[in-house]
Image: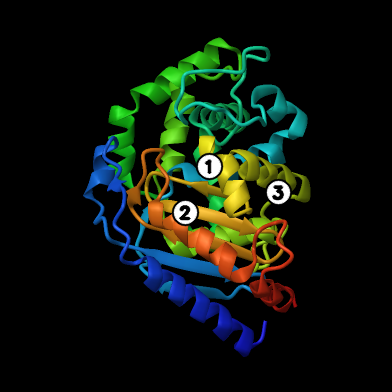
């Protein structure tokens, strides 16, 4: 991407940020008490290209906890180390028309519907704890750090807050243990999940993590191979169909790129072989999605022609330039 192309993209990112900065819909998540302390009006957009460049607007360097944005990356690690068949035995790939923290499993297979809802993510955590033993969190953190291109660490206050209040997630862990999804103690699976959700990131980190998936598993800035092709393909597929929970169908029609949000205000979106997008905005809607994060991706998709099936948007002319 030459400087003129980069300048065009930077102008669009800045315009979208300015357009949405006045939006104040949504509330900061407070069911995890430590999250309620985040200033509500922070807002940052970062876009990472396949050349390793990161274009930023707003509060892109402000740390927040990754929360459910960690789910696709943990899923990719599980696929990488355990293989598709073993993971598929434990976690499905179907959308679920229930709340993200629903205490339900697939009726026929007795497994979580997908890895983007809490039951599926805790199942993945249990599989990783079972595979790696006590080193599971260090292994997971190392892989997510490689995707971000820098070392990530836990926000201890958020972790302690999650551990003190996460009774529903512990209930899910016990349900999964009873169903035979994993054999390690339920509390060990839940604790790994709490810790992964409490990793501290920035919008810039999230954009680079998305760009690592977009770059077929290699961090585009460092060149390090993080995930294999098969793991990336399955992860992006499940993100596309299930990443926005019961709003996934609307998202696919309106925005048309794989994405995952978190109640900490983060959102990652992936434009295959072109871009990773990271947005941070603490105000979330009733489903736990950052309001300005959803709007930012919708505007960028429209302005740049990012929808998977887009062919007529004039902005799509930018994409061949980015791919060079």
Mark 3 — residue? 232
Residue 40, by quadrant, is bottom left
Identified at 63% across, 84% down, the residue is 5
Q: Whole-percent x and y of residue 66?
A: 43, 49
User: In the rendered image, is residue 68 in sight?
Assistant: yes
Residue 45, above or below 51:
above
Q: Whole-percent x and y of residue 322?
A: 68, 75
- The residues bearing labels 2 and 3 have C-alpha atoms spaced at a distance of 23 Å
Identified at 57% across, 18% down, the residue is 105
| 2 or 1: tag closer to the N-terminus | 1
Which label belongs to residue 244? 1
Identified at 54% across, 62% down, the residue is 277
Determine contact: label 2, label 1, CB under 8 Å. yes
The answer to whether residue 219 is left or right of residue 188 is right
Quarter in which the N terminus is drawn? bottom right
Determine contact: label 1, label 3, CB under 8 Å. no
In front of the other: 209 or 97: 97
Residue 234, above or below 1:
above
């Amino acid at each position: 991407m030459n400087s003129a192309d980069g300048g065009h993209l930077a102008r669009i990112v800045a315009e979208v940020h300015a357009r949405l900065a006045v939006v104040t819909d949504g509330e900061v998540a407070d069911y995890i008490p430590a999250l309620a302390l985040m200033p509500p009006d922070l807002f940052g957009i970062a876009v990472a290209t396949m050349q390793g460049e990161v274009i930023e607007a707003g509060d892109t360097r402000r740390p927040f906890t990754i929360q459910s944005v960690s789910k696709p990356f943990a899923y990719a690690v599980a696929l990488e180390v355990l293989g598709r068949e073993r993971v598929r035995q434990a976690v499905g790939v179907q959308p679920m028309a229930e709340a993200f923290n629903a205490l339900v499993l697939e009726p026929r297979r007795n497994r979580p519907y997908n890895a983007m809802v809490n039951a599926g993510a805790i199942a993945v955590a249990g599989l990783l704890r079972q595979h790696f033993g006590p080193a599971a969190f260090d292994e997971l953190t190392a892989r997510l750090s490689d995707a971000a291109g820098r070392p990530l660490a836990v926000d201890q206050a958020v972790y302690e807050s999650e551990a003190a209040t996460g009774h529903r997630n512990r209930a899910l862990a016990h349900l999964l243990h009873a169903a035979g999804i994993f054999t390690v103690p339920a509390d060990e699976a839940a604790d790994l999940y709490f810790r992964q959700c409490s990793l501290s990131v920035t919008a810039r980190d999230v954009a680079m993590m998305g760009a690592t998936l977009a770059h077929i598993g290699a961090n585009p800035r460092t060149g390090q191979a993080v995930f294999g092709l098969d793991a990336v393909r399955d992860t992006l597929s499940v993100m596309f169909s299930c990443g926005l929970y019961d709003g996934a169908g609307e998202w696919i029609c309106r925005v048309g790129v794989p994405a995952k949000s978190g109640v900490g205000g983060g959102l990652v979106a992936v434009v295959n072989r072109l871009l990773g997008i990271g947005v941070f905005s603490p105000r979330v809607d009733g489903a736990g999605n950052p309001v300005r994060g959803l709007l930012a991706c919708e505007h960028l998709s429209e302005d740049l022609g990012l929808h998977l099936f887009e062919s007529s948007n004039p902005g799509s002319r930018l994409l061949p330039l980015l791919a060079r």
